[in-house]
């Protein structure tokens, strides 16, 4: 075929496919991005005001199920939204989201369609968005991400100042001059039929994070807060239940009906290392309101005492000055008796006498003594 001419081919050919000169640069750039994000996740901080505050720990709403306590979900969300000093955290399973494998059959028994289920989720987030500080997804939430690569929660919270991760969140909780390390997961390893909080406690032993508070959901057993001790320090294992009162899948594999709700509440007091826990969000909110009222009353009382202590008390100099400046014929009531004063010295003495003086560690402004 001596007369055959080669075609002109321009595009992505095997030659270009074999050229990896730019691949190393691209992968190293990706590695730098991943390492930066991981380092950022290891140095996270949430700082709360130095006053009585509370955190409502939410999980396992399971919106869409016909057996979910929707009245309680709405009441708790509104209570968080209306309670001053109360913040919200969420650690997984906002909806049932039966979209994978054989679990798709369960979707046909839902109270509402998948579309309405998702709309309820969006509405619930809007109710608590202003109070949210942490969001960690659960296995039901992640089914959407695994199938589509898209996270509805991440998209919904994009402009919200909240810590977010699909699997695990660790952060320092700073309050009243005390730092506590918190580790949040929806599901933990090392489960036990004898101790509901066993995964958290063993997670401290076998994990690589020295946390003070471990938080879990997923099991639907109930809402607990169990103190445990490591290295001579009190730690806390928090396990939340579910708002789903009955689960056909759970019954199928032999689980008992859930107890309590999917929310518990913790109260932090300024300067106190120990925490106060409430299985009932309503009781916790009542206590927080009372604690904040007492705190404000005490703060106002201390302000009044300080203001009273800062008021001026008469000194020898101020008494003598004011008697002179008051036109008392040049006489003063100083400790050494009557002393005459020149008119020109009165003005300069007033200036000195009105200056702030320090007595017993307090600032005091001079005030006149009473004339008899």
Image (cartoon, grey):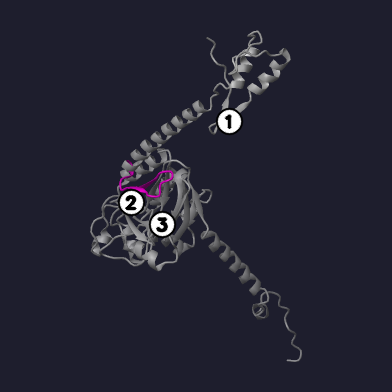
Instruction: Determine the image quadrant of residue 286.
Output: top left
Magenta span has 322? no
- Identify the magenta region: 262-282
Which numbered marker is on residue 337?
none
Vertical arrangement, residue 321 with respect to residue 159, above or below? above
Q: For the residues marked 1 and 2, what is the alpha-carbon distance in whole angstroms?
A: 57 Å
Binning the other alpha carbons within 10 Å of mark 3 as few (below 14), some (14 to 19) or many (20 upward) gives: many
Q: For the residues marked 2 and 3, what is the alpha-carbon distance in whole angstroms?
A: 22 Å
Q: Are marks 1 and 2 in contact (CB under 8 Å)?
A: no
Binning the other alpha carbons within 10 Å of mark 1 as few (below 14), some (14 to 19) or many (20 upward) gives: few
Which residue is the site of mark 3?
212
Binning the other alpha carbons within 10 Å of mark 2 as few (below 14), some (14 to 19) or many (20 upward) gives: many
Q: Where is residue 352? Give x, y as percent.
A: 66, 23
Vertical arrangement, residue 89 with respect to residue 332, above or below? below
Which residue is the site of mark 2?
262
Which residue is the site of mark 1?
358
Residue depicted at x 59% and y 64%:
33
Instruction: Determine the image quadrant of residue 22.
Output: bottom right
Decide which of 179, 17 is in the foreground and name it.
179
């Amino acid at each position: 075929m001596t007369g055959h001419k080669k075609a002109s081919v321009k595009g992505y050919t095997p030659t270009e496919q074999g050229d990896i000169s730019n691949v190393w640069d691209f992968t190293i750039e990706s590695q730098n991005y991943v390492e930066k994000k991981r380092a950022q996740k290891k140095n996270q901080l949430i700082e709360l005001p130095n006053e009585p505050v509370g955190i409502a720990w939410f999980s396992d709403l399971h919106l869409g199920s016909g057996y979910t306590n929707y009245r309680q979900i709405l009441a708790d969300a509104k209570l968080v939204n209306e309670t001053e000093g109360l913040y919200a955290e969420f650690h997984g399973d906002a909806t049932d989201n039966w979209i994978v494998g054989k679990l798709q059959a369960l979707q046909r028994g839902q109270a509402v369609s998948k579309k309405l289920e998702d709309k309820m989720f969006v509405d619930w987030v809007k109710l608590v968005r202003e109070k949210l500080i942490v969001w960690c997804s659960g296995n039901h939430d992640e089914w959407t991400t695994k199938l589509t690569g898209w996270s509805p929660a991440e998209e919904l919270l994009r402009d919200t100042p909240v810590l977010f991760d699909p699997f695990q969140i660790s952060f320092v909780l700073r309050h009243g001059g005390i730092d506590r390390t918190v580790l949040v997961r929806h599901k933990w390893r090392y489960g036990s039929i004898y101790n509901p909080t066993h995964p958290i406690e063993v997670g401290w032993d076998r994990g690589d994070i020295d946390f003070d508070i471990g938080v879990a959901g997923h099991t639907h057993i109930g809402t607990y807060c169990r103190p445990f001790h490591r290295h001579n320090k009190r730690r806390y294992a928090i396990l939340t239940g579910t708002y789903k009162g009955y689960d056909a899948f759970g019954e199928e594999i032999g689980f008992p009906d859930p107890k309590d709700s999917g929310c518990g509440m913790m109260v932090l007091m300024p300067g106190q290392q120990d925490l106060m826990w409430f299985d009932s969000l309503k009781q916790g909110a009542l206590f927080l309101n009372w604690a904040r009222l007492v705190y404000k009353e005490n703060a106002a009382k201390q302000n009044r005492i300080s203001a009273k202590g800062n008021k001026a008390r008469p000194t020898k100099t101020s008494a003598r000055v004011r008697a002179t400046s008051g036109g008392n014929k040049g006489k003063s009531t100083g400790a050494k008796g009557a002393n005459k004063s020149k008119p020109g010295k009165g003005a300069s003495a007033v200036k000195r006498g009105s200056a702030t003086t320090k007595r017993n560690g307090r600032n005091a402004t001079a005030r006149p003594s009473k004339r008899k």
